[in-house]
Image (tube, rainbow, N blue to C red):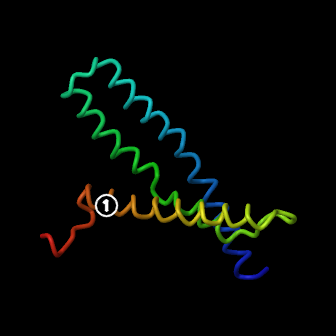
Amino acid sequence: MSALDATRAELALLVLYLNKAEARDKICRAIKYGSKFVSNGEPDTAQNVDKTTSLARKVFRLFKFVNDLHGLISPPAPGTPLPLILLAKSKNVLLLTFLFLDQIVWAHRTRIYKNKKRA
């Protein structure tokens, strides 16, 4: 087994583990939008729930970029046309970048990461 195959196997296990958090993310999303509906558009309650659940949902997306990293380094299925391969790989790169940067934003908002230049 090559080092790349071992890395793929380890990433596949990590992807399986991280996918379990998606159900919790969906529950938070239902709470977020349900509270907006129940609060009848009042800004205080809806905004408070919106802010707290959006930060909570970001926790469930921690290291989700690994899914797209795994898809990026995995070989395409045999016989797949080149345009589809390029489209899938570019999707993986874009999602990987977005999710990785989203984690940096979350770390900054929760004050885990502090920008030395602004402080």
Question: In the displayed structure, would residue 61 be above or below residue 32?
Answer: below
Identify the image quadrant of the N terminus.
bottom right
* Number of numbered discs on residues: 1
Question: What is the x, y in percent for residue 115?
Answer: 21, 70
- Which quadrant would residue 23 be assigned to in this image? top right
- Considering every residue shown, the one lying at the far left of the view is 119
- Which quadrant would residue 70 be assigned to in this image? bottom right
- Which quadrant would residue 42 be assigned to in this image? top left
Identify the image quadrant of the C terminus.
bottom left
Q: Which residue is drawn at 23% across and 60% down?
A: 111
Residue 26 shown left or right of residue 8 in the figure: left
Question: What is the x, y in percent for residue 39?
Answer: 28, 19
SS under mark 1: helix
Question: What is the x, y in percent for residue 21?
Answer: 52, 46
Q: Residue at x 33, y 18 (%)?
A: 38
Q: Which residue is drawn at 48% across and 65% down?
A: 97
Question: What is the x, y in percent for residue 107?
Answer: 31, 60
Question: In the displayed structure, would residue 59 be above or below residue 35?
Answer: below
Residue 15 shown left or right of residue 119 in the figure: right
- Considering every residue shown, the one lying at the far front of the view is 83
Amino acid type at circle 1 is Ala
Question: Which residue lies under the disc numbered 1?
Answer: 107
